[in-house]
Image (spheres, rainbow, N blue to C red):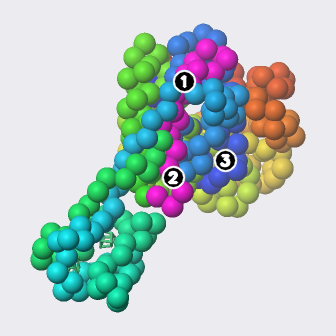
């Protein structure tokens, strides 16, 4: 199975739209499975026309533990009071017990270590959801969603990829929609990929974030190519991106012009390649340049 990861240093450059259309075109000739690893803002399934009710299975997973008090074991010594670096402990003066703010607790366990009576326990909390659905194009999407304010996105990404690989045993291509940025979920998305499609737009922040994201890709020694979306909005920076690609021995996989249909397709919950057939050429061009073997 070839693992192709689509990433962007910054959000809003069209990464998920491009991933969805690549999957649609690729699936016409190859067996494909997709993984939505943008777990803080997952929308690949939506772009492919799958609504909540269309998922065939969903289940919750835990990536984090939370401190909880076993009140009968507490001797009210107060040793835990100032032990939390994250400010998750509020001292209840009346009862002389700690109260834990579940949103702030990172599950580090420091409070449990200082407690002399084992009154603080770390309990697993279901804080993420994984769903699987089949698109009308015939391939499946494995989608991960981290609940609001929760930590552990890298673990959710790893789980989504694992399930996609299990479910797609017969698939030739796993297409991964990575999170934006350069943090833990991006590293988890990129790890083990055979090729990275880096999507950017010709703005100063687009170029700067592209360089940052590709520094992660280069660290893992993964070959990559660049897609410049809306290239005609700023030809000067588009040329700068092309020069940057050359300096990295990377190919510009495609230069996609600004097209209002991208937004209209999102509103209609359709991949752009289905909504505006004229865009198909760009996705075929990208696919021709990806080393799929
Ligand atoms: S487990 Fe860590 S983060 Fe959570 S309340 Fe205890 S010290 Fe704070
Ligand atoms: S350290 Fe343990 S025993 Fe002491 S107040 Fe905190 S929870 Fe209670």
Question: Residue 211 occupies which quadrant of the picture?
Answer: bottom right
Task: Name the disc covering residue 56, or none.
Answer: 1
- The crowd level at tag 1 (other Cα within 10 Å; few <14, some 14-19, many 20+) is few
Q: Nearer the viewer, mark 1 or mark 3?
A: 1
- Tell me where the magenta segment starts and ends, as one range: 130-150
Q: Is residue 76 above or below residue 26?
A: below
Which residue is painted at 50% across and 49% down in the image?
A: 146
> Is residue 30 shown left or right of residue 25?
left
Question: Residue 281 occupies which quadrant of the picture?
Answer: top right
Label 3, on which residue?
A: 200
Task: Name the disc covering residue 147, or none.
Answer: 2
Q: Residue 125: where, in percent of width, then height?
A: 37, 53
Instruction: Indicate the quadrant containing the N terminus: top left, top right, bottom left or bottom right.
Output: top left
Task: Please tell me in which quarter of the rendered image ligand 2 is found.
Answer: bottom left
Cβ atoms under marks 3 and 2 closer than 8 Å: no
**Separation of disc 1 and disc 3 at Cα?**
33 Å
Cβ atoms under marks 2 and 1 closer than 8 Å: no
- The crowd level at tag 2 (other Cα within 10 Å; few <14, some 14-19, many 20+) is some
Which residue is painted at 63% across and 34% down in the image?
A: 52
Of pointers 2 and 1, the one earlier in the residue sequence:
1
User: In this view of the protein, which residue sits in the foreground, 28 or 225?
Assistant: 28
Point out the residue furthest to the right here: 260
Of pointers 3 and 2, the one earlier in the residue sequence:
2
Of pointers 1 and 3, the one earlier in the residue sequence:
1
Cβ atoms under marks 1 and 3 closer than 8 Å: no
Q: Residue 103: where, in percent of width, then height?
A: 46, 66
- The crowd level at tag 3 (other Cα within 10 Å; few <14, some 14-19, many 20+) is many
């Amino acid at each position: 199975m070839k693992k192709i990861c689509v990433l962007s240093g910054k959000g809003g450059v069209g990464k998920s739209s491009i991933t969805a259309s690549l999957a649609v075109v690729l699936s016409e000739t190859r067996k494909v499975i997709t993984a939505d690893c943008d777990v803080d803002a997952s929308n690949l399934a939506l772009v492919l026309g799958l609504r909540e009710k269309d998922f065939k299975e969903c289940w919750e997973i835990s990536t984090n533990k939370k401190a909880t008090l076993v009140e009968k074991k507490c001797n009210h010594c107060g040793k835990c009071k100032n032990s939390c670096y994250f400010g998750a402990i509020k001292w209840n003066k009346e009862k002389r017990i700690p109260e834990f703010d579940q949103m702030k607790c990172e599950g580090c366990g420091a409070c449990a270590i200082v407690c002399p009576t084992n009154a603080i326990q770390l309990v697993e909390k279901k804080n993420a959801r994984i769903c699987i659905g089949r698109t009308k194009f015939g391939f499946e999407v494995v989608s991960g969603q981290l609940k609001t304010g929760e930590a552990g996105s890298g673990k959710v990404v790893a789980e989504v990829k694992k399930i996609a690989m299990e479910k797609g045993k017969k698939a030739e291509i796993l297409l991964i929609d990575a999170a934006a940025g350069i943090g833990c979920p991006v590293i988890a998305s990129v790890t083990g990929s055979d090729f990275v499609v880096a999507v950017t737009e010709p703005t100063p922040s687009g170029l700067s974030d592209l360089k940052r994201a590709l520094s992660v890709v280069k660290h893992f020694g993964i070959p990559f190519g660049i897609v410049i979306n809306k290239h005609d909005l700023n030809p000067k920076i588009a040329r700068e991106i092309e020069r940057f690609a050359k300096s990295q021995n990377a190919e510009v996989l495609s230069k996609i012009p600004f097209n209002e249909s991208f937004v209209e397709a999102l509103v209609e919950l359709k991949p752009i390649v289905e909504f505006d057939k004229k865009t198909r050429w760009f996705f075929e061009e990208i696919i021709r340049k990806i080393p799929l073997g």
